[in-house]
Structures are given as C-alpha cells and as structure tokens.
Image: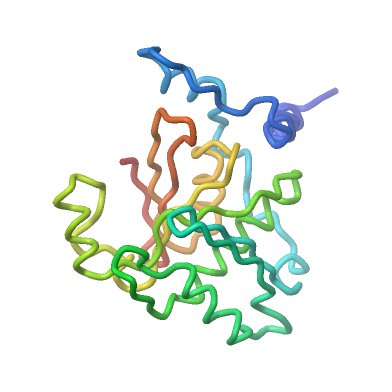
Amino acid sequence: MTTRRQVLKKSILLTAAGLFSTTKLVGSAHAADAKSSELAPPPDLFDSQALDIDFWVKPRTIDLIRPASNERSKLLYWKDGEIIDSAYQELCHILRDVNGKQSAAIDPKLFETLWATQAYVARFGMTKPLEILSGYRTPDSNRRLIEQGVPAARKSLHMDGKAADIRIPHLHEEVLGSLITSFREGGVGFYYRASANGGWIHTDTGLQRSWKG
C-alpha cells in the first residue's frame, strides 16, 4: 500500500521534472493562493535529521549562480574535513555586495547550510544551481534597501556575512524553507511572492527562529 509520504515524494520528483512548475497567472487576483494550494507541502516532507554520517563526511561541491552579476561558480570547497581556501575566497566573492562592490568573510557555517540544502534536494533529481539573491551587504546597502521598502532588518546578519537570500528553480519556497529549518543551524525567513520566479528564503547562522515576510 502506498504511504502518504511516498505520494508526497513522488510529487516532488514531478516538480523536479517541471510538471508542477509554477505558471504565471496574468491578471489573476488569486495567483498567490493558487500557487500555494498547488505546491505547498506539509512541513514534514523533507527532514535533514534523517541523514546518515556519510552525507556529512563526503567532499562538498557547491553550484551557485548570482543573477545580479550573471556569475556562476561550481566549486569543490571542502574535503577531508577542511575548507579549501581558494574555493572559499571565490565563494565569498560570489556572495559579495554587488551594489556596494565590496566583499567580506562569509561564515563557513552558512556555506555548510547552502551546500547541504543543494546536496539534499539533488537526491530527488533537482540539480539546478542555487540562486544567491543577496549575500553580504554593506551598512550603506542595507540602509538603502530599508529606505526603498525592501524587507531588511536594521541589524541584518547580511552585514556580518552570516546570511543569504536564496532560491532553487522550480522548488516551492515552503519546501526549501522547511528543509533549511530542519538543519537547525539558524534563522529562516519565508518570503512568498506571486511572480514568475516565485519568492525566496532567507537563511542565516544566527539564533534558531523563523518568520514570514
């Protein structure tokens, strides 16, 4: 007999194949509700606590794309328990403040969360690069976002190199955010948007908490 969890996982595989990808609903007042009701899964769909030790000790390659600068990097950045410094420096560059044109040291724990998220969903056939919408921010850049009405905290962890706003193509924000929450490594913000690309997830290495914005 097929279990509820098997049915849910089958739905995710179909999503990866593009069969359930979000369709832009032009002129529809209920676009956001339609998207949520079609794709939002129960919060227990992905649970990283079920991972075995082999997942965490294998070499780590991360595939990132930065739409704002049209850059992409696929790097082996961790092996045999150590970060590869040259790869780490390149990753910090990818997560730089594109507007402020300044980079900073990024918390290695943040890269661990980004890698683990990507490696986990790859098990279900989702191998698209992880999109970095925002990484490090200078105080000036963070202030400008607030002035423009963009969701940004005055003491944002982005300014400490401890946060990133991300998405994975064709993966619903609820699924992505719930997975990251299950890693129990920091804060997770769910930002739902009725657009062709959907919303995004904020992940950081601060206190464990979650919110919707």
**Residue farthest along the right direction in this orientation:** 1
Residue 138 lies, with reference to residue 168, above or below; the image says: below
The picture places residue 26, in percent across and down from the top left corner, at 43, 16
Residue 160 position by quadrant: bottom left
Depth order, front residue of 160/129: 129
Protein image colouring: rainbow
Depth order, front residue of 98/152: 98
> On the picture, is 179 further left or further right than 142?
right
> On the picture, is 1 further left or further right than 139?
right
Task: Pick the quarter of the image with the C terminus.
Answer: top left
> On the picture, is 3 further left or further right than 196?
right
Residue 23 lies, with reference to residue 102, above or below; the image says: above
Task: Pick the quarter of the image with the N terminus.
Answer: top right
Query: Which residue is painted at 56% across and 48% down in the image?
Result: 179
Query: Which residue is painted at 48% across and 30% down in the image?
Result: 196
The picture places residue 6, in percent across and down from the top left corner, at 76, 32
